[in-house]
Image (tube, helix red, strand yellow):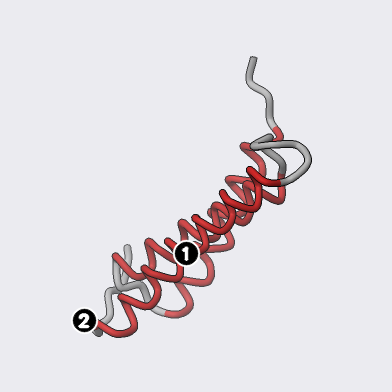
Amino acid sequence: MIERQDRNGLRDGALFLLGVVGIVLVEVVASSGPGGSEQTAMHGFLFGCSVGIMCSGIFRATGKQAISSTVALGIGFAFGAVVDVF
């Protein structure tokens, strides 16, 4: 269960914007690299971490929960980028 903090517009907005900026930067850097938009583990990890930071701002997670969910999403996205289902 997520323990929500009191609403703090500056903190929550900053986390949300940091996540959105991270997603944009990861996508711009990945698409301009030598491999194009090819999925790599590092790209997946950075994208997942950006999503985790953004969601921490949306759901008002505590600091400990924000860190653990960010790392967990990063690892999950990295694993998903290297696993070829078909």
Residue 17 percent coordinates (x, y): 38, 69
Residue 48 percent coordinates (x, y): 54, 53
Q: Examine the rendered structure and indicate whether residue 34 appears above or below residue 15.
A: above
Q: Examine the rendered structure and indicate whether residue 16 appears above or below residue 46.
A: below
| Depth check, front residue: 65 or 12 | 12
* Side of 85 where 15 appears, left or right: left
Q: Examine the rendered structure and indicate whether residue 15 appears above or below residue 74.
A: below
Judging from the image, what secondary structure is the residue with disc 2 in? loop
- Answer with mark 1 or mark 2, whichever residue precedes in sequence: 2
| Residue at the (49%, 62%) spot, across then down | 69
| Residue at the (27%, 74%) spot, across then down | 4
| Depth check, front residue: 27 or 65 | 27
Residue type marked 2: Arg
Residue 28 percent coordinates (x, y): 58, 51
Tell me the residue that label 1 is attached to.
21
Numbered mark located on residue 4 in the image: none
Within 10 Å of the Cα at label 1, are there few (<14), some (14-19), or many (20+) other Cα atoms? some
| Residue at the (35%, 72%) spot, across then down | 61
